[in-house]
Amino acid sequence: MRKGRKAAGILTAGLLAFALAACGSGGSKSGGAGDHSAAKESSGKKVTIELAISKSSQDSAFIQQDLLDEFEKQTNIKVNLQLIPAEQTTTVLQTKLAVEEAPDIIQYNLASATTDLNLERNFEILDDEPWASRLLNKDVLSAYGHIYSFHVSQDTGMQGVVYNKDIFEELGLSIPNNYEEFLAVCEKIKESGTTPVFMPYKDNWAINIWPAAAFADFVSKTDPTFFDELNNNKRKWSDIPEFQTFLQQQYDIYKMGYTNTDVLSDSYDMAVGKFLNKEVAMMFMGDWLIEGVAQQDPNMRLGVFPIPAIDNPSLGASPLGGQLFIPKTAKHIEEAKKFLDFMASKEIAQQIVDSKGYVSNFSDVTTPALPEYKQEIVDLYITPKRTVLTTDAYMLVDRNELYRMLQDQFAGGMTPEELLKAWDEKFNQLMTDKQVPGF
Amino acid sequence: MKTTKQLYSYYLVLPALLIYSVFFVIPAFAGFYYSFTDWRMDRLTLEFIGWNNFRTIFSDKTLILALKNTLIFAVVTVLGKNLVGIALAVALNMKLRTRNLLRAIFYSPSILSILVIGIIFTPILRTEGTLNHVFDTLGLHSLSQAWLTNPNIVVFTIAMISIWQHAGFQMAIYLAGLQSISNEYYEAATIDGAGSWKKFTNITLPLLLPAININVMLTLIGGLKVFSEVFVLTGGGPGNASQVVGTIILRAFGEGNWGLGTAINTLLFVAVTITAIPLLIFMRRKEVAE
């Protein structure tokens, strides 16, 4: 008995110690700062520059080890990679920039950098770099009239309805040109026993693909000054009644039973598997999904067509992502610029463009033969100018709250009308916080 | 005797005090200060803006919902973890052959990582998930729910998972408390003719009060500070339906609104302090000496 009591005492003490330790750890706010292996800075010696990149971008062409080795051999500059966990990338970079411990190079998306990282304050303007004169499309690297970022590609991702061509051919379906035709296509696919549309809306950003393309497509054709006026506080999201229609359309597709049943439980990472198993025929997504499926099974024939919210829709184009940036507070700005020069050199850029199947952004670098779906996008949409930049390109604020509201719509908590009103309020608050003129 | 008392000077606490100040006191006070400023990611200067952040908190529907959810979560988990914990402790203090095995089983969820629990429970709680299948098989269709995607019940679902995980931990503390109660009381009560319920309410509960106190405190503070359970299972969704103070702080920081984020944090700190300290004093008074 006494032995048992002693044991109990020790157990209690141990548990309390554990509990206290657990309490203590709750308060820490570590920014996940990487170790700064400060390079010896005497001239002629080896310099180490830091390149920060999200773990989810590890397939980036700019951090392939053979290129980094080649760069080090030519310039005696070593590139140290800081891999940041994907969900913390924004916060970590914001913190590093705020405390002026910025890495020398950052890979990030230009559009998000303007909303999340305060481009003008934090990053070098690259207008006068030697490679700038060879660019074919400066817009995909520019904001506020200046080049702020670097990339060898000008291939903006496309967003629309990703679909399985084999299923469409088997059922004799053609690409729908408006909402009614789309519903008819859904009905035919459903009758054949396949789920027409996969909605992985546990990941709330995925709900925005339909509205982001539909909104932008509609106003670009009927009300081209809308986004300028919206960003000057002269117009509101709820001013356009059709926006309600577009939100209702997406919800109706779910309500009519054309989707997976558990839309708020299914997540994006299930999408590739659903397509590979031919469980689903379509999904509102970017063309990066097609690449993801092709990596698993090169025989899958997928394509993408425009979000059919209006008649004769245009294909949504998302802003280019994965650019390189040089922070103003970087310790080795000259070396970082040399890194960009190296990547921009004709041989290296050609090597990257070839291996990744990019549409080249340099006049002296040739675009390789494109995969079928990409060539189709070029022929059917880019060349005839049937593309439209999605709302992502015009929204200057953090969009997460919009995504949550869209999710709320699917949970039955909001009508499209209430949603647009609520987003007006939040949008106004976010713009006011950013001190945008007019708000 | 006197010399032994003076052997260690109070100066010896200085190193500990210094570490405590640098890593807790100073950041806490800096947090108080920043919560009255418009500190933002995209601004170089920060201005003192008085109570504005707190006004924002109490005028934002989502933030009020988050406060409400946090309270619901705290109350439900304090009750659940402690009731289940006491029940388990009393049951597993009896002379059962499988006692040690059962103790280990009930304790084991609390050593799992919350990430693992999130991964395990998400498929179980899907609308077409295991739990609803079980209900359907038993003919209890009416009990089937969209556990994690119905805005009205999602907070309770998360609270239940938290109870499942931590009740075993509370049980361990209660077991230690139970074992410190001398058997003589029970023997005397038996002679006086007391039944087992009488024994429980008149001997076990009063003498268990120290353990109850520490458990209620731990679960209450844990409940008010809830973050990981919600973050892993729903991320505050669907929409904002299961946002709690912890996830709202993350959202505010994510939007670059650092002043507002620290203000909510300050509010949480104050709320935990003003509920925990009076409760502690109140319960201390109720404790009886063995």
Image: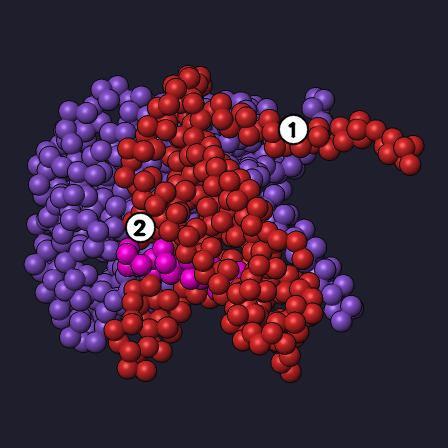
Chain colours: A purple, B red
Question: Mark 1 belongs to which amino acid?
Answer: Val
Q: Is residue B287 magenta?
A: no
Q: Quadrant of the N terminus of chain B?
A: top right
Disc 2 is attached to a residue of which chain? Answer: B
**Where in the figure is residue A32, as x and y percent of width and height?**
57, 40
Q: Is residue A83 visible?
A: no
Question: Mark 2 belongs to which amino acid?
Answer: Ala
Asked which secondary structure carries label 1, the reply is helix
Residue in the picture at 51% in, 40% down: B278
| Disc 1 to disc 2, C-alpha distance | 37 Å
**Where in the figure is residue A245, as x and y percent of width and height?**
10, 48
Question: Is circle 1 on the same chain as circle 2?
Answer: yes
Asked which secondary structure carries label 2, the reply is loop
Q: Is residue B155 magenta?
A: yes
Tell which of A183 and A104 is nearer to you.
A183
Tell me, for residue B22, which label it has, or none.
1
**Where in the figure is residue B20, as x and y percent of width and height?**
67, 32
Residue in the picture at 43% in, 40% down: B250
Q: Quadrant of the C terminus of chain B?
A: bottom right
Tell me, for residue B71, which label it has, or none.
none
Q: Please name the residue that numbered disc 2 is placed on.
A: B241
Q: Is residue A304 left or right of residue A273?
A: left
The residue lying furthest to the front in this view is: B192
Which region of the structure is painted magenta? B148-167
**Where in the figure is residue A154, as x and y percent of width and height?**
35, 39
